[in-house]
Image (cartoon, grey):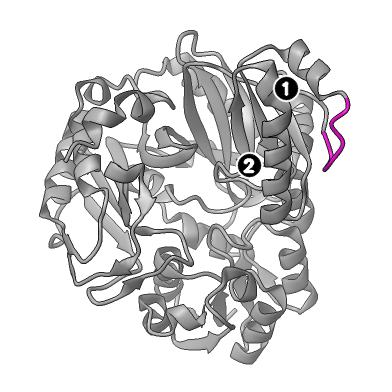
């Protein structure tokens, strides 16, 4: 392998290229019209235009990406996260074109990308799964009310395909169920090409805890510990950390064992994340989904373990990684990641596109990492996710990590658009957060005080 095409943009494209360079590999970037002068384009050894600014016509266009990979003479394709990273057809097309797909097999991607199928596989591996309904295909809702009554309210309507919180709605009363189910089917069909949904029991005070796994494709797997992603809004993560605060060690161990067992049973190859919902009252945990790619929050694990997960992905695809055992993985201290968005917390976190007239980041310092795909003068457009950067703080203790993150956030200077910087600082400083009493409704419960001007 000599050249890797990075089929993505922004921060994650720059991140993948960094590991490629460290491994002595050339990189090829792709870009839409809106990204012609972007940071990831300049970071690559070569760059190829793939169409208009619309994601569907560029970063989601399999044919254009394969054509760019051929033009670049790429030996392999790394998909990053989002876009086509969990698209089995794209993975298959890369392999059919004679290139290496840096990720799990298309079959595993397909199985885990179907949330209901993933639930069945988790259950077969002895992993706890929340009660849920059968699949309701687009327009087929005849037994919906009966299924809702059987599960009980409140409950969640969830798209069978997709992820990232898209296609997920809370239902509190029976009369809300059909309208919300129809709306979710319509959204899922538009977003994923699959309008199927299912119902799932809702845990009122829930935590979102995930386990970073790495499989070797032959029935063996390890974990690199867990991350708590409970601090979120509208099912979108905002702050992630590891280890998960106030989680019993016995629960932590059982969760890691369940995630690793599922990974091994699927002969999973590469990096992945098994996500769980945890009852904050009882600490009972249940399988949520598996993401068959690198996660946005992977730097949290890298800071704690000292492992380069992207390099591990690439080396596994090259066949040079070798098999690790669990005792090879050690973690130290605490890491916490803050996602910095171009958005306005005072207007319900509406995206705030615009030009970064000023974008000053802190000088490198111990215990701080910042990943970004933007520079001063760059445009944050409405075409893509408004995340500008990720700031990760690491310390010997959780309090030390929080203090480092707070200090670094205070040193960031951004002008030209609204951001959530003040909101992030307020969240990290909140007494409930400082005590580790996080749950998925934390931001909703405290939004008025966290988003104060």
Q: Position of residue 396 (x, y in %)?
A: 21, 34
**Mark 1 to mark 2: distance in Å?**
27 Å
Give the image location of residue 74, x and y in percent. 61, 83
Q: Nearer the viewer, residue 221 or 114?
A: 114
Q: Is residue 440 left or right of residue 343?
A: right
Q: Which residue is mark 2?
A: 167
Q: Quadrant of the N terminus?
A: bottom right
Would you call the spot at circle 2 few (<14 residues within 10 Å), some (14-19), or many (20 or more)? many
Residue 126's tag is 1
Q: Residue 259 at what x, y percent from top left?
A: 61, 32
Rendered image: mark on residue 370: none
Percent position (x, y) of residue 117? 79, 37
Magenta segment, which residues? 136-142
Q: Crowdedness of circle 1 by 10 Å Cα count: few (<14), some, many (20+)?
A: few
Magenta-colored stretch includes residue 350 = no
Residue 137 on the magenta segment: yes
User: From this viewpoint, is residue 29 visible?
Assistant: no
Magenta-colored segment: predominant secondary structure: loop
């Amino acid at each position: 392998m000599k050249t890797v095409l990075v089929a993505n943009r922004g921060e994650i494209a720059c991140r993948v290229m960094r590991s490629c360079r460290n491994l002595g590999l050339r990189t090829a970037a792709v870009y839409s019209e809106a990204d012609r002068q972007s940071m990831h384009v300049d970071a690559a050894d070569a760059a190829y235009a793939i169409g208009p600014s619309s994601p569907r016509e560029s970063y989601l266009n399999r044919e254009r990406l394969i054509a760019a990979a051929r033009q670049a003479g790429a030996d392999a394709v790394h998909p990053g996260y989002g876009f086509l990273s969990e698209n089995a057809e794209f993975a298959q097309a890369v392999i059919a074109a004679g290139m290496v797909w840096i990720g799990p097999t298309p079959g595993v991607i397909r199985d885990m990308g179907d949330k209901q199928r993933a639930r069945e596989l988790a259950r077969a591996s002895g992993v706890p799964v929340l009660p849920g309904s059968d699949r309701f295909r687009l327009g087929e809702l005849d037994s919906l009310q009966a299924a809702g009554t059987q599960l009980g309210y409140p409950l969640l309507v969830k798209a069978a395909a997709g992820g990232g919180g898209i296609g997920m709605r809370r239902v509190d009363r029976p009369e809300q169920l059909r309208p919300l189910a129809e709306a979710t089917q319509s959204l899922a069909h538009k977003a994923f090409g699959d309008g199927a949904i299912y119902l799932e029991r809702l845990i009122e005070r829930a935590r979102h805890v995930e386990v970073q796994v790495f499989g070797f494709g032959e029935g063996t797997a390890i974990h690199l510990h867990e991350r708590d992603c409970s601090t979120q809004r509208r099912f979108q993560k905002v702050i992630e950390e590891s280890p998960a605060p106030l989680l019993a060690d016995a629960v932590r161990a059982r969760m890691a064992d369940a995630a690793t067992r599922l990974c091994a049973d699927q002969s999973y190859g590469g990096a992945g994340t098994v996500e769980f919902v945890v009852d904050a009252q009882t600490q009972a945990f249940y399988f949520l989904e598996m993401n068959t790619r690198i996660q946005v929050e992977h730097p949290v694990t890298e800071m704690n373990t000292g492992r380069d997960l992207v390099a591990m992905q690439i080396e596994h695809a090259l066949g040079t990684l070798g098999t690790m055992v669990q005792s090879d993985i050690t973690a130290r201290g605490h890491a916490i990641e803050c996602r910095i968005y171009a958005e306005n917390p005072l207007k319900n976190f509406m995206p705030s596109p615009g030009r970064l007239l000023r974008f000053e980041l802190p000088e490198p310092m111990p215990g701080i990492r910042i990943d970004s795909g933007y520079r001063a003068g760059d445009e944050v457009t409405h075409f893509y996710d408004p995340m500008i950067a990720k700031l990760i703080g690491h310390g010997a203790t959780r309090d030390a990590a929080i203090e480092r993150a707070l200090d670094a956030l205070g040193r960031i200077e951004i002008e030209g658009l609204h951001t959530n910087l003040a909101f992030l600082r307020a969240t990290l400083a909140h007494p409930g957060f400082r005590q580790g009493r996080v749950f998925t409704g934390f931001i909703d419960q405290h939004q008025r005080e966290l988003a104060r001007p």
